[in-house]
Amino acid sequence: MRASVWEVGFMVRKRIYFSGQVQGVGFRYRATWIARTLGLTGWVMNLPDGRVEMEVQGDPYTVGQMVQRLYEERGIRISFIESEDIEVNISERKFREMY
């Protein structure tokens, strides 16, 4: 569903790829918990190449907070992030782990 600027306001949606020690360390579980705590929507999943892919949606400041908190999580070692802005999904209501 396409969203108008009026409906979206200051909301952004980002597709982010995390590289480093990001699989087998509880990354998806912690990303889901952080996102839900911050009121963000989207999803997170492991990729076969060892990276983690995430789409996250909310106001820009809160999305930035989520990424910062993931950097600070014990056991997670993010070495590189690729990020791009994508279209906001106004019908999405929660953040979830995907398999």
Image: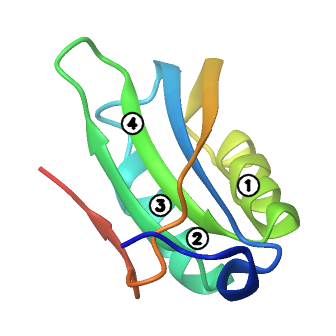
Residue at 79 percent across and 48 percent down: it is 68
| In-image side of 64 versus 83 (left or right) | right
Q: CA distance from mark 4 to mark 3?
A: 14 Å
- Give the mark nearest the N terminus, 4 or 1: 4
Q: CA distance from mark 4 to mark 1?
A: 16 Å
Q: Nearer the viewer, residue 84 or 64?
A: 84
User: Image quadrant of residue 62?
Assistant: bottom right
- Give the mark nearest the N terminus, 4 or 3: 3
Disc 4 designates what residue? 53
Amino acid type for the residue under numbered disc 1: Arg
Residue at 36 percent across and 60 percent down: it is 43
Disc 2 designates what residue? 34
Q: Would you say the residues marked 4 and 1 are in contact, meaning their CB atoms lie under 8 Å apart? A: no
- Give the mark nearest the N terminus, 2 or 4: 2
Disc 3 designates what residue? 30
Asked which secondary structure carries label 4, the reply is strand
Amino acid type for the residue under numbered disc 2: Ile
Residue at the limit of the structure toward the right, as seen here: 61
Residue at 31 percent across and 70 percent down: it is 96
Asked which secondary structure carries label 1, the reply is helix
Q: Would you say the residues marked 1 and 2 are in contact, meaning their CB atoms lie under 8 Å apart? A: yes
Q: Position of residue 29 (x, y in %)?
A: 36, 61
49 shown above or below 36 = above
Q: Position of residue 78 (x, y in %)?
A: 61, 25
Q: Would you say the residues marked 3 and 2 are in contact, meaning their CB atoms lie under 8 Å apart? A: yes
Q: Position of residue 95 (x, y in %)?
A: 40, 74
Task: Please state which of the two labelled residues, at mark 4 or mark 3, is closer to the viewer.
Answer: 4
Mark 1 neighbour density, 10 Å: few (under 14) some (14–19) many (20 or more): few
